[in-house]
Image (spheres, rainbow, N blue to C red):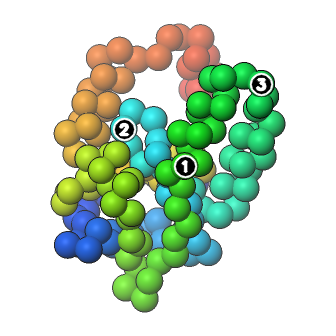
Amino acid sequence: MPFGEYPYTLDDKGRLVMPPSFREFVEDGMILTRGMEGCLYVFPLASWKRVEEQLEGLPLTDAQSRAFVRFFYSGASKARLDNQSRVSVPQTLRSFAGLESDVIVAGAPGRLELWHPPRWEEAITSVQHNPPQPDLLANFVA
């Protein structure tokens, strides 16, 4: 499972050097797509297959399900690390996430997240000041 957060920079061609601790996680390829709270999600191919199975199970007759699948799939892009351990982030996804130069690369269960640093700080501060309800954390700490 990938964990940690690392500040990195996009080059002028929209490429991001993958932090060394995350390279093995995505070495077989990855899917980049829109995430929640204005970040990007990066799924290794094996994890993406599980995500697809869940999305395919959503009811086609439900408008909210269709909208979410559309949001998630239409921005998806398949990628691989190049010889210098860089991944090219498509312009449409960079625009969505507000990524211009500086990027926070953060680990999460089953995925990585790419954040515009001010959004990252806002998201972290929000959780710090408004933690999840106790019932969501009931089994978190033993």
Q: Disc 3 marks which residue?
A: 61
Q: Position of residue 40 (x, y in %)?
A: 42, 48
Number of marks in picture? 3
Coordinates of residue 90 in the picture (x, y in percent): 39, 63
Residue depicted at x 36% and y 23%: 127
Q: Mark 2 falls on what kind of element?
A: helix
Where is residue 22 shown, x and y percent of the image?
47, 65
Mark 3: give few (<14), some (14-19) or many (20+) Cα within 10 Å. Answer: few
Do the numbered discs 3 and 1 sit on residues whose CB atoms are within 8 Å? no
Report the residue at 69% width, 47% height from top. Answer: 51
Query: Quick one: SS at disc 1?
Result: helix
Do the residues under discs 1 and 2 have CB atoms within 8 angstroms? no
Residue 24 seen in the current view: no
Quadrant position of the N terminus in the picture: bottom right
Q: Is residue 65 above or below residue 27?
A: above
Q: Is residue 137 left or right of residue 13?
A: right
Q: Is residue 73 above or below residue 126?
A: below
Query: Can you identify the residue that label 1 sits on?
Result: 74
Which label lies toward us, 1 or 2? 1
Say which label, 3 or 2, has the lower sequence index. 2
Kind of residue sitting beneath label 2: Gly
Question: Which residue is denoted by mark 2 in the rendering?
Answer: 38
